[in-house]
Image (cartoon, rainbow, N blue to C red):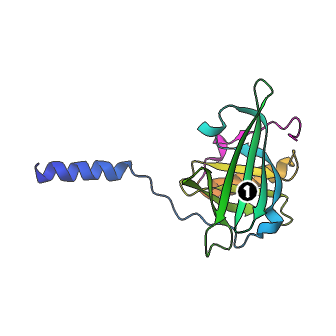
Amino acid sequence: MKPAFLALTALMLLAGCRSHAPLPTVERLDIPRYMGTWYEIAHLPNRFQADCTADTQARYQQTGEQVEVLNRCRMKDGSVKAARGIAKVVPESGNAKLRVSFFRPFYGDYWVLGLGPEYEWVLVGEPSREYAWVLSRTPQLDEATVQAALAQAQGLGFNAKAFTRTRQTQPIE
């Protein structure tokens, strides 16, 4: 191959790469305080939640060194879809970075980017900025707080206008 062709190919490949500024997390996350049920208020659309139409929630329970995760949502027909996984804290992250797996051995990033002072809401995302969620301890979150979380997401490089609101009609027991 000619050097000019190789250089052009390398340039095109580099042009296709997305680079992002580092994604800051909260300084420290108190894992026991974070445990419990969180209701999804908004999220960036993704393929693994495409069938969910309402009542998306996550329940976290610490078991030794890891955290058990149970995500559930209501489907269009009223049935409940559930996914169980585990999360592990990334060392030296102040507990704010976790690696979550629903299909071991594959793990994804789950970073706590924003957090209410009383752990009443949270903004979660990951470095590629393709996935993000606004969660609340209650099925509803006041609009000012939602807007503040979305503004924070926008400031971190997420597309805040792409977030979809999640209908919370009835808790899943």
Residue furthest left as drawn = 2
Which amino acid lies under the numbered mark 1 shown in the image of this protein?
Answer: Glu
Q: Residues within 10 Å of mark 1 (few under 14, many from 20)?
A: some
Q: Is residue 116 above or below residue 5?
A: below
The residue singled out by tag 1 in the image is: 68
**Residue 106 seen in the figure:** yes
Q: Is residue 103 left or right of residue 140?
A: left
Q: Is residue 170 above or below residue 96?
A: above
Q: Position of residue 148 (x, y in %)?
A: 76, 55
Residue bounds of the magenta highlight: 158-173
Q: Is residue 72 above or below residue 134?
A: above
Q: Is residue 168 left or right of residue 150?
A: right
Please name the residue shown 75% across and 25% down the image. 76
Q: Considering the numbered disc 1 on the image, is that residue within a helix, a strand or a loop? A: strand
The quadrant of the rendering that contains the C terminus is top right
The total of numbered circles placed on residues is 1
Residue furthest top as drawn = 77
Q: Position of residue 106 (x, y in %)?
A: 54, 52
Say if the magenta span includes residue 172: yes
Q: Main secondary structure of the magenta part?
A: loop
Q: Choose between 145 and 166: the one closer to the eye.
A: 166
Q: Position of residue 49 (x, y in %)?
A: 66, 38
Q: Quadrant of residue 112?
A: bottom right
Please name the residue shown 84% across and 47% down the image. 143
Say if the magenta span includes residue 159: yes
Q: Quadrant of residue 34?
A: bottom right
Q: Choose between 8 and 83: the one closer to the eye.
A: 83
Q: Position of residue 171 (x, y in %)?
A: 88, 40
Q: Is residue 77 left or right of residue 154?
A: right
Q: Choose between 104 and 43: the one closer to the eye.
A: 104
Q: Is residue 62 above or below residue 78?
A: below
Please name the residue shown 65% across and 33% down the image. 50
